[in-house]
């Protein structure tokens, strides 16, 4: 008697690490020129769940727009998992920024993706 699995399968894919652009090295050499990228651990690739969209908050760079730290919305991956179909976030209008004017924070509605599940 096999039970039907009701949990959707979480499909993960490897994408190039946005923060280090696939180099595996810390792009800002904050610790040392030899330090590994803190996002991908030096592998140059990160795992993301599909489907995903480019992070609107950091424009897909993986770098926080107000600092040189990793983007707090996508954790430096440059992409954010959002279930399809998606629609433009009504709170930030797709910018991924907190609409209250605090540009250090990603939009709380879409988490910085700029889109939300429709
Ligand atoms: Zn990296
Ligand atoms: Zn981001
Ligand atoms: Zn939003």
Image (cartoon, rainbow, N blue to C red):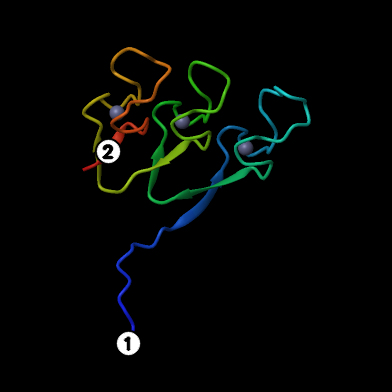
Q: Foreground: 6 or 83?
A: 6
Whether label 2 touches label 1, CB < 8 Å: no
Residue under pointer 2 = 116
Q: Position of residue 109 (x, y in %)?
A: 28, 31
Q: CA distance from mark 2 to mark 1?
A: 38 Å
Q: Residue at x 48, y 19 (%)?
A: 65
Q: Residues within 10 Å of mark 2 (few under 14, many from 20)?
A: many
Dot 2 beta carbon under 8 Å from ligand 3: yes
Q: Position of residue 54 (x, y in %)?
A: 42, 36
Which of the two residues, 19 or 104, is positioned nearer the viewer here? 104
Residue at the location (25% across, 31% down)? 89
Is residue 66 shown above or below 50?
above
Q: Name the residue that disc number 1 marks.
A: 1
Left or right of residue 16: residue 53: left
Question: Up-down: is 30 above or below 83?
Answer: above
* Secondary structure of residue under mark 1: loop
Q: Earlier in the sequence, mark 2 or mark 1?
A: 1
Seen at 62% across and 33% down, the residue is 20
Q: Is residue 54 left or right of residue 13?
A: left
Name the image quarter holding residue 35. top right
Q: Is mark 1 within 8 Å of ligand 3?
A: no
Kindly state the secondary structure of the residue where label 2 is placed.
Answer: strand
Indicate left or right for 72 with 99 as reference.
right
The quadrant in which the N terminus is found is: bottom left
Count of numbered labels shown in the rendering? 2
User: Residue 66's x, y, as percent?
Assistant: 49, 15
Q: Is residue 74 above or below residue 98?
A: below
Numbered tag placed on residue 38 in the rendering: none
How far from the left and from the top, in percent, is residue 22?
Answer: 63, 39
């Amino acid at each position: 008697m096999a039970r039907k699995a009701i949990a959707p399968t979480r499909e993960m894919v490897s994408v190039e690490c946005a923060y280090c652009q696939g180099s595996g090295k810390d792009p800002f050499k904050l610790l040392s020129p030899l330090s590994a990228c803190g996002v991908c651990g030096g592998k140059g690739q990160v795992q993301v769940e599909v489907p995903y969209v480019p992070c609107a908050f950091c424009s897909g760079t993986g770098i926080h727009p107000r600092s040189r730290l990793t983007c707090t919305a996508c954790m430096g991956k440059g992409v954010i998992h959002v279930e399809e179909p998606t629609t433009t976030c009504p709170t930030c209008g797709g910018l991924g920024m907190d609409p209250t004017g605090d540009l250090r924070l990603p939009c709380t509605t879409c988490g910085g993706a700029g889109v939300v599940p429709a």
